[in-house]
Image: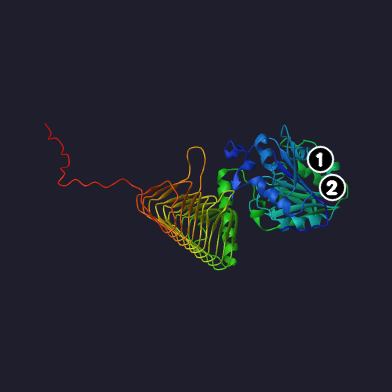
C-alpha cells in the first residue's frame, strides 16, 4: 500500500560495498532475505514512499547489481551511478549529486539494511520538513562500531564515528542508523565541503551534521526502538539471524490475523503470502512467490508452495510440492492434494479434485470431481468432470519436438498403467482397459483395450541355476 507525502522524495541507496565478510562471489546487496535480494527490499520500501526516483550507487559487483535494480517491473524510476574507487559514504553520495534534482528531499538508505519500514521513513521525512536534517537513530546497549549521536540538550551537534570517538563519546548509547532525510539543495552544499581528515582516511557522509550546525540548520533525530529496522548484514551469520527474526515477526503477524501455525519457529515466507480466515499451516512449510490461501485451507507438514491460489476448504497433505512459476497453479474448493504430489505450472484444478501420492500435473485442467490418486502423470491435458485416472497411467504429450494435448471427457475411467499418446481424445463415459496404449481417439461410451494378447503355457518349467562346480 502506497503512502502519500507532502514532499517530493528522491531515494539514494548505497550499494557499492564489497561485503568481504560474506565470503561469496555474489555481491552483498544481492544476498537474499526471505527469498528477495537485500537491495530489492530497500527499493520496495522506497516505492511505498511514492518516491520520485531511486539512485542506486554501485561499485563492487556493479555488473551483477545493476541489471537487477534496472530490470523492468520496478515500482519507481531507478538509475545507477558508479562509485569507483570506494572512498567512504560521503564519497558515495557525492556520485549521486549530478542526477539529484534540487527541489526534493533526499532519503539516504543502505542496500544491506532490508527491513526498514515505510512508516518509519515517513516519520523521518516529516521530521525533516523540507528544511532540516533528520537522522534515524536508535539506542544500543553495545554501540561499538557505530557513529555516536552527540547532543547539546536535545539538539544534535555531531555524529562521531567509533574510531574517531573519545572515551567519553564511546559511552554514548544513541547511534546513527545510516539513514537520513535531508533537502537536496542543502545536501549538495555540504557534500562539496567534505574532507578525509579522520582515522579511516575516508569521506564521511556523517560530517554533513557539523556543516548543518555551522550553517544554523536544525539537526533533528527520529529515534526508534526496533533494532530489526536498522539491522545491516555483513556476514552469513548476520544474514541467518535476521532471516530468523524476520520470519518470526511474520509468523506473529499471521497468527494475529487468525492463521493457525503449528510452530511459528518452523514457518518460512519467501514471497507474498495472503491468508483468509481459519487457515491452518503445519510445520516446515515454505511459501514462495505469490501465494493465496482461502478460507479454511489446511496445509500439511513439509510442503513447498509457490505462485499458487488455493480455494476454500482445500487440503494440501504433507510433502506436496506446488510451483506455478509464471503460469500459476490454482486448486479448487474442497480439493485434496498429496501427500507427495507435484503440481507444476499451468495446473488448474477444479472443486473436489483429488491428486494423490506421486502424481504430477503440468499445464492441465481438471474439472470438478476428477481424481488421479496414485503414481500418475498428466501433462498438457484437459480432464472432464468425475474422471478416474488410474495408477501408473501417463499422457505421452511430447514427441521429441512438440507438445500435444490430451482430452479426457467427462465420466471416463482410465485403467492402471495406460499410455495416452497425444494428440488424442477419450470420449465421454468411455473406459480404457488397464495396460493399454491408446494412439487413436475413442468414441463416447466405448471400452478401449490396446495391449498384447496374453499367452499362457501350461506346466512351464522355469530355468534353473547350474550347480556350482
Kind of element beneath mark 2:
helix
Disc 2 to disc 1, how far (Cα)? 22 Å
Location of the C terminus (image quadrant): top left
Q: Is residue 390 left or right of residue 235?
A: left
Q: Position of residue 259 (x, y in %)?
A: 55, 65
Where is mark 2, residue-wise?
A: 212
Q: Residue at x 65, y 52 (%)?
A: 115
Vertical position of residue 264 compared to residue 344: above or below: below
Between 392 and 146, the residue placed more toward the observer is: 392
- Can you tell which quarter of the image residue 19 is in? top right
User: Which x, y percent locates residue 148?
Assistant: 72, 49
The residue lying toward the viewer, choosing from 289 and 23, is: 289
The quadrant in which the N terminus is found is bottom right
Residue pointed to by mark 1: 99
**In the displayed structure image, the side of residue 425 where residue 212 appears, left or right:** right
Q: Which mark is residue 353?
A: none
Q: x, y (%) of residue 383?
A: 49, 56
Residue 122, placed above or below residue 32: below
Amino acid at each position: 500500500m502506497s503512502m502519500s507525502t507532502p514532499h517530493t522524495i528522491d531515494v539514494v541507496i548505497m550499494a557499492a560495498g564489497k561485503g568481504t565478510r560474506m565470503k561469496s562471489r555474489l555481491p552483498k546487496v544481492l544476498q537474499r532475505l526471505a527469498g528477495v535480494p537485500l537491495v530489492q527490499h530497500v527499493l520496495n520500501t522506497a516505492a511505498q514512499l511514492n518516491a520520485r526516483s531511486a539512485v542506486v550507487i554501485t561499485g563492487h559487483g556493479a555488473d551483477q547489481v545493476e541489471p537487477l535494480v534496472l530490470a523492468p517491473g520496478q515500482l519507481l524510476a531507478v538509475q545507477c551511478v558508479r562509485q569507483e574507487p570506494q572512498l567512504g559514504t560521503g564519497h558515495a553520495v557525492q556520485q549521486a549529486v549530478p542526477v539529484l534534482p534540487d527541489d526534493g528531499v533526499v532519503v539516504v538508505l543502505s542496500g544491506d539494511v532490508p527491513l526498514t519500514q515505510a512508516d518509519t521513513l515517513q516519520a523521518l521525512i516529516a521530521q525533516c520538513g523540507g528544511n532540516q536534517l533528520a537522522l534515524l537513530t536508535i539506542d544500543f546497549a553495545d554501540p561499538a562500531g557505530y557513529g555516536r549521536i552527540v547532543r547539546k540538550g536535545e539538539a544534535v551537534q555531531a555524529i562521531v564515528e567509533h574510531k574517531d570517538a573519545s572515551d567519553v563519546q564511546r559511552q554514548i548509547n544513541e547511534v546513527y542508523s545510516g539513514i537520513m532525510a535531508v533537502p537536496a539543495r542543502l545536501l549538495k552544499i555540504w557534500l562539496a565541503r567534505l574532507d578525509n581528515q579522520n582515522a579511516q582516511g575516508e569521506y564521511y557522509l556523517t560530517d554533513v551534521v557539523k556543516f548543518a550546525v555551522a550553517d544554523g540548520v536544525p539537526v533533528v533525530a527520529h529515534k526508534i526502538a526496533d533494532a530489526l529496522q536498522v539491522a545491516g548484514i555483513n556476514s552469513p551469520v548476520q544474514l541467518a539471524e535476521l532471516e530468523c527474526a524476520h520470519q518470526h515477526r511474520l509468523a506473529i503477524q499471521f497468527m494475529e490475523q487468525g492463521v493457525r501455525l503449528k510452530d511459528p519457529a518452523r514457518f518460512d515466507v519467501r514471497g507474498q503470502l495472503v491468508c483468509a480466515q481459519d487457515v491452518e499451516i503445519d510445520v516446515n512449510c515454505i511459501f514462495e512467490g505469490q501465494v493465496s490461501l482461502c478460507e479454511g485451507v489446511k496445509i500439511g507438514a513439509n510442503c513447498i508452495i509457490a505462485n499458487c491460489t488455493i480455494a476454500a476448504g482445500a487440503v494440501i497433505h504433507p510433502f506436496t510440492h506446488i510451483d506455478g512459476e509464471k503460469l500459476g497453479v490454482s486448486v479448487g474448493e474442497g480439493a485434496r492434494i498429496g501427500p507427495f504430489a507435484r503440481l507444476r505450472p499451468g495446473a488448474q484444478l477444479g472443486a473436489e479434485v483429488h491428486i494423490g501420492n506421486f502424481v504430477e500435473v503440468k499445464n492441465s485442467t481438471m474439472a470438478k470431481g476428477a481424481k488421479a490418486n496414485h503414481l500418475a502423470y498428466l501433462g498438457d491435458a484437459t480432464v472432464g468432470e468425475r474422471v478416474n485416472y488410474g495408477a501408473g497411467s501417463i499422457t505421452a504429450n511430447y514427441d521429441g519436438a512438440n507438445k500435444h494435448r490430451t482430452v479426457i471427457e467427462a465420466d471416463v475411467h482410465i485403467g492402471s498403467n495406460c499410455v495416452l499418446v497425444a494428440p488424442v481424445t477419450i470420449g465421454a463415459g468411455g473406459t480404457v482397459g488397464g495396460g493399454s496404449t491408446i494412439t487413436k481417439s475413442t468414441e463416447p461410451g466405448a471400452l478401449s483395450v490396446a495391449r498384447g494378447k496374453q499367452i499362457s503355457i501350461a506346466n512351464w518349467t522355469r530355468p534353473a541355476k547350474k550347480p556350482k562346480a
